Image (tube, grey):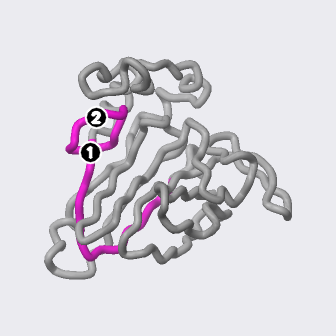
Amino acid sequence: CPGIKPSAGEKLLAGGGFELPANKSRTIQLPLLWSGVFWSRHGCTFDKYGRGRCTTGDCGGYLSCNGSGGSPPATLAEFTLGLLDFYDVSLVDGYNVLTICNVLVINRAVEEAKQAKHWLAARYIKYVFRPLFHKSLFSSAHCCTRLFGNPISCKQTAYSKIFKTACPTAHSYAYDDPISIFTCSKANYIVTFCSHHRR
């Protein structure tokens, strides 16, 4: 069940979330200028009224998040669209499912982007992280808040190093290096959420 949260003042897309069965896809038309995040909710059950819960990434017990974000842990795909698009995969709010962003090239000027692997799935991360582990780490140092709310005092922790090792091009903490942000123009994007379990 993907969740979608627009940045402040941006258009709400697809009610902010929807059910998406395994091996299915859904196309969402985004405005040319837009910013926000997509995330996967895992272990979800909803009734016919769209009420229920998700084990990870839950947004208040609703299928349609309506602008609310997901509760950690949640792997985020972050986008800022404009003349030049910026996107990244963030593990700042934790890891709940593998997330892959690919670029669909629609002009020759960005052919190189199609050939590049912008964000590769982690091979071993599912073995080193469990959602309950993350919940015990909500401190100012880990979340880069209060005294740690700036790039000088917010440093990589042992926890964020696990993610950076497994996913070197994903953001692993709030002030991670800028190589984790990718740019592209005149492209469409595919965001793929992969389950914990292989069948």
- Determine the image quadrant of residue 19: bottom right
Q: Residues within 10 Å of mark 1 (few under 14, many from 20)?
A: some
Residue to which mark 1 is pinned: 180
Q: Residue furthest bottom?
A: 107
Residue 179 falls within the magenta-colored stretch? yes
Any mark on residue 176, and which? 2
Q: Is residue 125 above or below residue 27?
A: above
Q: Residues within 10 Å of mark 2 (few under 14, many from 20)?
A: many
Q: Amino acid at mark 1?
A: Ser
Residue 171 falls within the magenta-colored stretch? yes
Residue 48 in the image, given as x and y percentages of width and height: 85, 64
Q: Amino acid at mark 2?
A: Asp
Q: Residue furthest front?
A: 9
Residue at point 58%, 31% (across, down) = 131
- Disc 2 on helix, strand or loop? loop
Specify the quadrant that holds the N terminus.
bottom right
- Determine the image quadrant of residue 123: top left
Image marks 1 and 2: residues in contact by CB distance under 8 Å:
yes
Residue at point 38%, 18% (across, down) = 147
The Cα–Cα distance between marks 1 and 2, rounded to whole angstroms, is 8 Å
Any mark on residue 130, and which? none
